[in-house]
Amino acid sequence: MLRINNQAIYLTKGDSAYITFILKRPDDSIYELVEGDQVFFRLKVEKEIIEIVCTTDVNNNTVALAIRPEHTENLKTGRFKYEVELVTEDGDHSTFIADAPFTIGREIENRAE
């Protein structure tokens, strides 16, 4: 189960999640992606940082994050923090979501192999 409330994310452990971002500037105008821009999602779970490179679509001006089961299935449940950062083609860094809450919830399913 995926729930997003403002920037707070709740995801059941081991589930898939697909989140699309549209980047805005501080003046609320839309940032236009260019070839070479990269967006990184980082989830801090205790001392570990999980980093996922997002897919950027310059034609539709969107950024897509795909959280796969393997990203969370071996993590502890609980409340953690995440950020999302744009690194532009010319090397500028802009964290557009910082220190936001990310909860990994328990699942009932037992995934025996």
Image (tube, grey):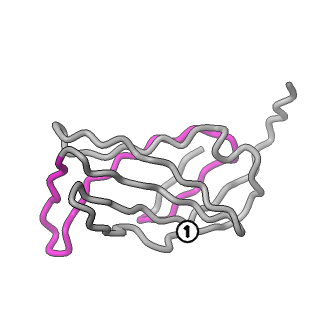
Q: Residue at point 57% right, 68% down?
A: 81
The residue at which mark 1 appears reads as 101
Secondary structure type for disc 1: strand
In the image, residue 62 sits, relative to residue 45, either above or below, namely above
Image side of residue 56 versus residue 103, left or right? left
Up the image or down, 63 lies above or below 31; here it is above
The magenta segment is 6-34
Where residue 111 appears, as percent x and y from the top left, is: 82, 31
Quadrant containing the C terminus is top right
Residue 93 in the image: x percent, y percent? 31, 68
Residue pictured at 67% horizontal, 56% vertical: 104
Magenta stretch encompasses residue 21: yes
- 109 with respect to 54 (left or right): right
Magenta stretch: includes residue 96: no
Snapshot quadrant of residue 88: bottom left
Residue found 44% across the figure and 72% down from its top: 98
Residue 82 placed where, x, y %? Answer: 53, 65
**Residue 35 in the image: x percent, y percent?**
20, 44
Q: Quadrant of the N terminus?
A: top right
